Amino acid sequence: VQLQASGGGLVQAGGSLRLSCVASGSIFSINTMGWYRQAPGKQREMVAGITTTGSTNYADSMKGRFTISRDDAKNTVYLQMNTLKPEDTAVYYCNAQIMTLVPRLEYNYWGQGTQVTVSS
């Protein structure tokens, strides 16, 4: 099983980006999906999460600016980021709790990260 994140890039403050993360491989089901980020010299922090029922949660600093969504038919989670700020600059990682086909066990998977840089 792999998670492939994409959509990062360089954007000016106030701009928008949409991140995508596709899960592939021997997947039986996907439980919670989410996004984390890690800025230089800082610990990785949670950005947003979404359950199988569509329930979402966000870090306080992202509320109202970021929107997480998922398309289960495509095994994909998205992060729409609006009104970006220079402090949003970080490597963004997708995360998913995935039950594999064989063995029928749930594991925690991480994507490779995608760089988001917001210039002032």
Image (cartoon, rainbow, N blue to C red):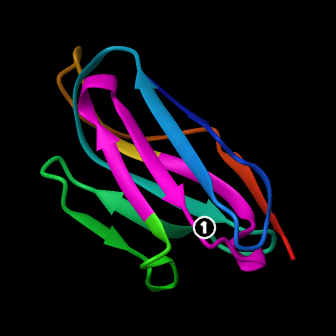
Q: Is residue 60 above or below residue 90?
A: below
The residue shown at (17%, 47%) is 52
| Element at label 1 | loop
Q: Nearer the viewer, residue 63 or 113?
A: 63
Q: Determine the residue positioned at 39% across, 56% down.
A: 68
Residue 3 or residue 11, whichever sits in front: 11
Label 1 amino acid?
Arg
Residue 6 lies, in percent from the top left, at: 62, 37
Residue placed at 52% from the left, 39% from the top? 20
Magenta segment: 67-94
Left or right: 37 in relation to 8: left
Residue 81 falls in image quadrant: bottom right
5 sits left or right of 30 in the view: right
Instruction: List the single residue furthest toward the bottom.
Output: 60
Spot occupied by residue 37 in the image (x, y as percentages of width and height): 60, 62
Residue assigned mark 1: 44
Total numbered labels: 1
Q: Residues within 10 Å of mark 1 (few under 14, many from 20)?
A: some
The C terminus lies in quadrant: bottom right
